[in-house]
Amino acid sequence: MSSQTPIAEGSDWTFEALEAFEREIGRIAADKYRLDTYTNQIEIISAEQMMDAYSSVGMPVGYHHWSFGKQFLSTEQRYRKGHIGLAYELVINSDPCIAYLMEENSLTLQALVIAHACYGHNSFFKGNYLFREWTDASAIVNYVLFARDYISECEERHGVDAVESLLDSCHALMSLGVDRFRRPRPVSPEEERKRQKDREDYLQQQVNDLWRTVPKKKHEPEEKWPRFPAEPQENLLYFIEKNAPLLEPWEREIVRIVRKIAVYYYPQRQTKVMNEGWATFWHYTLMNDLYDEGLIGEGNILEFLQSHTNVIHQPDYDSPYFSGINPYTLGFAMFTDIRRICENPTEEDRRFSPEIAGSDWLDTVHHAMANYKDESFILQHLSPKVIRDLKLFSIVDDDSDSAIRVTAIHDDDGYRRVREELADQHNISKQEPDIQVWEVSLRGDRSIRLRHKQRDRIPLDEDDAKEVMKHVHRLWQFDVHLESVRDEKVHRVFHCNDDKVWIDSGESSNPAKPS
Amino acid sequence: MALLIIDRRQQGKQKSAVNRQRFLKRFRKHIKEAVSDAVSKRSITDMERGEEISIPKKDISEPIFHQGKGGKQRRVLPGNKEFIRGDRIDRPSGGGGGAGGKASSQGEGMDEFVFELNQQEFLDFMFEDLELPNLVRKQLKDSDSYKLVKGGYLREGIPARLNVLQSLRGAKARRIALSGAIRREIKALEKSLEEIGNDEESEERRDITVKLDRARRRLNQIPFLDDFDLRYNHMIQQPTPTTSAVMFCLMDVSGSMTQDIKDLAKRFFVLLHLFLKRHYEKTEVVFIRHHTKADEVDEEEFFYSRETGGTVVSTALDLMQRIVRERYPSDSWNIYAAQASDGENWADDSPKCRDLLVKSLLPLVQYFAYVEISSGRDQELWQTYSEIPTDFPDRFAMRKVSEPADIFPVFRDLFERRSS
């Protein structure tokens, strides 16, 4: 232990102490661990402001919508009643990287949070391939600002209610607003503004072409009409923005805004375990380094350890507090174990992870952070030791079986299976229903036909699906059909027309084959 | 790397205020019902408080496509204690099964969305769309309310009211005006300098150069902004017309009124009082209670003191008439009255009440509301009053109340905003 004096002691923080902590942590992070970050912007906020930040889903500004009010009221209520504590911090993937720190945090917590958010999350945002490809950190804040202004302008021109119900519909389809297999261009607000008008005109013209009713000169037989869309489309919002027959240009622009914001969040949804694990791993490592250098006192490091332990607590599956696998726990355990495998590999590690056993640990964790998402990260790096420590086991609940079956536990036979299934469990495209635009009746009744492919015979939740059908109809404005396909056969068909929604069992109708 | 630490705590925390309002607006029907329920359940002294509102979760859900129950669901769970591969576990009873649990986003079996309506919002909902009917502006009373309105610009004022635009505009005009002659001169001199050409040391040239220098110096001496340019916003106090109104609260406290009935009557007046206090700040309220004789009392006594006796309703009307004559001449006051009684009256007194109302009081008042608190058949006063409404359809209203839950609806009904 060095003879340095601690930066500060006790539980009250000061601005000088925050600056000193940021400086020292930044020094260690950059010099010793090569963490590459955006410039930090730390904002101190009160509990109430934290609730505000929660309800605008972590954005410094957001457009107005009742659902954010609902979010706020619910957070406020639960916080007041003591059901939940508020997060110590909230960090935004932007450049500079904005981190909100709560004023209630003690000195120790502020140091923890600076290490966690300003160096952990920040370096993840800057380094991970999904964030690099899908988001533009320097533009997001401006884009959201543009979105808010545009939407309030629409509210003035077209009425709050019209905009609100449009946003309701868009939000309902938000998770179907990304191209899972294609990388989008990052959003840029300047361009948006500049091109928006052109786009409006151009879009409308394209739509008009698509729906042109004047017959073509050459008389063609009905069957020759090309199928539209030629390939099934997975990005429903994009499809609606470009092709919905009756939307006004401003409505298309709002669909686009919601879609762009969905894209911004898409990487976050796919990297919860990694992102939190990475940040937790680094706050743990950095705080210990501060302690080793004597920059944090005994009392504060003990407080830190207690908070850290709370953060990575994983209740068992049968505990009343169980609510799924804690991404902090899993991610932290995995990064810690990668380091262990690199530094002190066992025989088992050499068998399971030959490519990293004994390699340079810092290179390895950096490589993992940069090149994986939750699903692939788990598939590649979940080690038998972590499975044993967490006592993971996998089950199958098959409705054609009378009981739930345990398919694998933490033993030699089970490691690979647990690993694969945990990876699947973190794969968004396997956890969310696979719904695509199947066909639009161009020359007929203009109806749109969607198709849901059931995975493992898992159906859609019918009550909610019926509600969402109404939202699709609100946007498409002609009949909407949704076929839910099980084992290549249509299992259920949802219909929505101007005044009602109903469900057919699939037997009567033939599965529509692509012609 | 330049670190930026910003202290945001001083800045507004009401970022979500708009979203909150949007939420309240969207679910106003639910909230209004809850408010109305709350009002009838609360004790008299406890009207001005926020309220916990709950709305069925399904009414405010934001549905998305998600996987339902059934099929073959796989899951990895932590904390295995006794299972080995191939074990079979009975499905937990009570629906659901372990799998498919991702469906509900936040709810843990709670069917209600609960949130706190604050006092302000509660009262807003409580008195929404209510008003004193037939309110007219009778006289610009010795007005004590003012509002500040813009009244042009001043040359003197406090810095906070400096009008930058006007000041700079004035400064620019002054600069143009003052510099015009000089600029012309400079231009002329420059031109003649050009005409002379590059004749090195001619007398004329030196002369012009000197003149040019002097002119330019003079131009530079014109100040960019002068004290003289400054303009300040002028704010004028404008008296705002206040509509003078008075509300008479007439309550029967006779022996026939049981404690329950009095409680109902008081509830009614509490609502009325609260409503007036909130929406008609300047309204005066006169409290009259009566048994065989009527007294004007203060608020405290009206709501809290106990006194009983026989019943002669006309005494209260009499007293009201006298007070109106003495203190609230009807040509300069909007006069309102609300009367609550169990409807029992001294044998011959009811016709007298009716006559008093029809002949003397109703012509004077904007609105007279009678609330009868009885559960049984129509009481005397009700029967007698029943003949009045036809004569004064929009000035007289009567309603019956039999239990606490009726009070709020009746109150709303009596003071509902009428579109005419």
Image (cartoon, coloured by chain):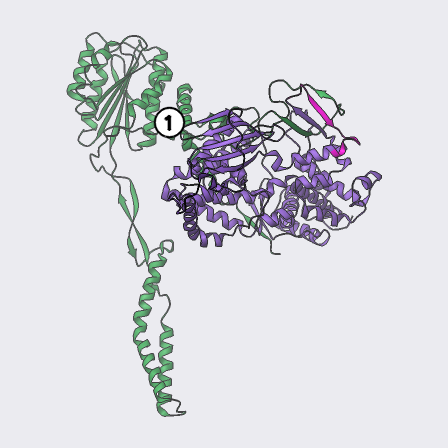
Chain colours: A purple, B green
Q: Position of residue B276 (x, y in %)?
A: 31, 28
B378, above or below A64, in the image: above
Quadrant of the image for the N terminus of chain B?
A: bottom right
Magenta includes B183? no
Residue A127 visible, this angle: yes
Foreground residue, B395 or A253?
A253
| Position above or below: B75 against A229 | above
In the image, farthest residue toward the right: A347
In depth, the one of B167 and B56 nearer the eye is B56
Q: Is residue B17 visible?
A: no
Q: Position of residue A142 (x, y in %)?
A: 50, 50
x then y, percent, for residue A48: 52, 38
At label 1, counting other C-alpha atoms closer than 10 Å, the crowd grade (few under 14, some 14-19, many 20 or more) is: many
Q: Quadrant of residue A427?
A: top right
Tell which of B81 and B32 is nearer to you. B81
Residue A180 position by quadrant: top right
Kindly identify which chain the residue marked by label 1 belongs to.
Answer: B
Instruction: Tell me: A306 left or right of B388.
Output: right
Side of B242 where A459 appears, left or right: right
Of A194 and A292, the residue lying toward us: A194
Residue A414 belongs to the span the image colors magenta: yes
- Image quarter (top left, top right, bottom left or bottom right) of the C terminus of chain B: top left
- The residue to which callout 1 is attached is B126
The part of the chain drawn in magenta is: A400-416
Judge from the rendering whether residue B87 lies leftward or rightward of residue A496; answer left or right.
right
Residue A170, position as x, y percentages in the image: 48, 38
**Count the marks: how many?**
1
* A215 left or right of B138 in image: right
Q: Secondary structure at mark 1?
A: helix
- Tag 1: amino acid: Met
